[in-house]
Structure formats: C-alpha cells, structure tokens
Image (tube, helix red, strand yellow):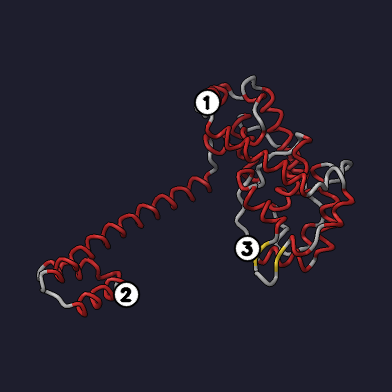
Amino acid sequence: MIASISEKAISFDKQEILQKEIEKAIELLHAFREKYSFFSNPSSIETLNPEAIFKIEKKKMGDFFDWINYYLKPLGNLTLDQNIYRNIRSQFDDFKDLIYIVVDKNKSLAEKVDANWNVIAGLGGDKHLAKKIIFCFNYQTKNVVPIFDTNHLKYFVNTIVGKPNFSTKFLTMSVGEKYQYLTNVLLAEKESSKITSTWEITYFCYFLYRIFPPEDIKSRDKRKKQFEKTMFSHKLDFRYFMETLNQLRKSGKISAEDLRNYRKQWENRTQDRSIILARLKSL
C-alpha cells in the first residue's frame, strides 16, 4: 500500500464514531444471518416465501429485502426500482436457485457473481444487488468486500496500489472474474499495512469512500449540497415573503383575499418572485 495512504489511515476516525456505527451494522448482519441461516443450513432456503420478497397487497418489499436494503444499509447503500422486487417474486424459484449458488461453499466468488442473475430483470449488468446478497451471506469467509460497483472497486485498487497495469487478460474477464480479481488485490493491499490489517473490511471500505471518493460520488455529493443550499435559500426567501405579507395585512394595506392571491402568485410564478416581492415592498 502507498505510504501516504497508510498515513491517512492513522488519522482516520480518531473519535471512533464511524467504527461504532459499523460495529452496530455487523451485529445486525449477524441477526440477519441467524434469521436467514442459508449459509450454515442451505436446506432452509426452502422456508423462504414470496411474501418475504415482495408484499403484493401492500405494494412494498418483504422482510428479506427490508433487511438487505434498510437494516443493512450501512454495509452498502443501493437505490433500486421497486419493480425489481416484483420481478424477483414473479420468478421466485429462479431466485431460490441463485441463493443456493450464493451459499455454496464450493463456488468461487466469480462463479457466484457470474451465476445467471440476468434471468431476472433488473439483477443483471454489474449485479450490484447480487453482490450485496453475496457479501451478506459470505461475510465470514473474509473473501468479500462491501463495494458492489466494479468501477469503484477498480478505482480504489488503482488508488491504493498506484495504478497497476491491468493485463489484456483482465479486459476479457467476465464480470465475476474481474470482481474476484479486484477484490483479492484490495484485500491483499489491506493486509499489507500494519494499520489497516486489523480493520474490519467494511470499516476499511468506508475509509476508502470517505477519503478517496470516486468522481461520480463527488459529483453527486456536490449536486446534493448545491440543491440543499438552493432549498435553504428558497426557505429564507419564503419566510421573508410571508413576513412582508403579514405585516401588510396587519397594517391594513392588503386584505385577507389579497394575501391569499399573493401567496398563489408566489407558488405559481416562481420566475417572478423578485417582482412580486418588489411590488409588496412598494405598498
């Protein structure tokens, strides 16, 4: 691992706030694995029922994916269309077959990722949801990482190794083979540092995302901050607008009906708000 990265690791999370959050998340992971003990008892996969996948009447995901997406959100945040869970329920037997592969101790990580997830619409491509399921059920093997985007994983390997030369063979690898190769490199680099070798893998990945965020995440965070800044500005403008209206109403310069009309104009003519406010101030 590059020395400068080890130096950053020394000063990371000094108050151990993040570490405590991760510890709670791992406790929840253990609870999930007790509830769905598929790895230790594959035959229990047959106890999984369609309602645990998606509740049709309530139009919401079932308990299994509540765990994956909400309770275990700290182990990897996924934003997916709800139709994916409908699709999984409609192909429930196919999904169970995939879970059998996920918990098969004789299958490699590459084989698990390369399993026929594409048979269910929404589970193909880079297979982010599949990778999170694989991570949750194979956590104790210490051969998996909670980074489900292959491009992010490659970026982190480049960052901490120092841009290794990927062979031509790498380019011809399957999604699962690339993912396994990059995972192995990342884990080896983690273990090469005296500091990070003692870290739990989720904590290490949080360190990478916090200190070396990929470009798409930096852009997303920048857009989010800009949106929040804009919304805050709009709230301040609206507060000032309402204070002005109430003062005019209190002084008798506008009627209650005028107040309602001005408010409707504010809501419906966003491009004219400065003009509306200037008109009020002139009264």
User: Where does label 2 land, which residue?
Assistant: 268
Question: Percent position (x, y) of residue 229?
Answer: 35, 52
Could you tell me residue 9's position as x and y percent? 55, 26
Residue 202: x %, y % from top left: 64, 36
Q: Which residue occupies the foreground of this view, 62 or 130?
A: 62
Side (left or right) of 93 relative to 271 = right
Question: Disc number at residue 8?
Answer: 1
Q: Quadrant of residue 62?
A: bottom right
Closer to the observer: label 2 or label 1?
A: 2
Question: Disc 2 versus disc 3: distance between alpha carbons?
Answer: 31 Å
Query: In this picture, is 140 found above or below 276?
Result: above
Q: Residue at x 61, y 34 (%)?
A: 203
**Which residue does the numbered mark 3 point to in the structure image?**
81
Q: Is residue 70 above or below residue 52?
A: above
**Mark 1 is on which residue type?**
Lys
The residue at the point 87 percent across, 57 percent down is: 46
Residue type, label 3: Asp
**Quadrant of the drawing holding the C terminus:** bottom left
Tell me if mark 2 has few (under 14), some (14-19) or many (20+) residues whose alpha carbon lies within 10 angstroms of its own.
few
* Three-letter residue code for mark 2: Asn
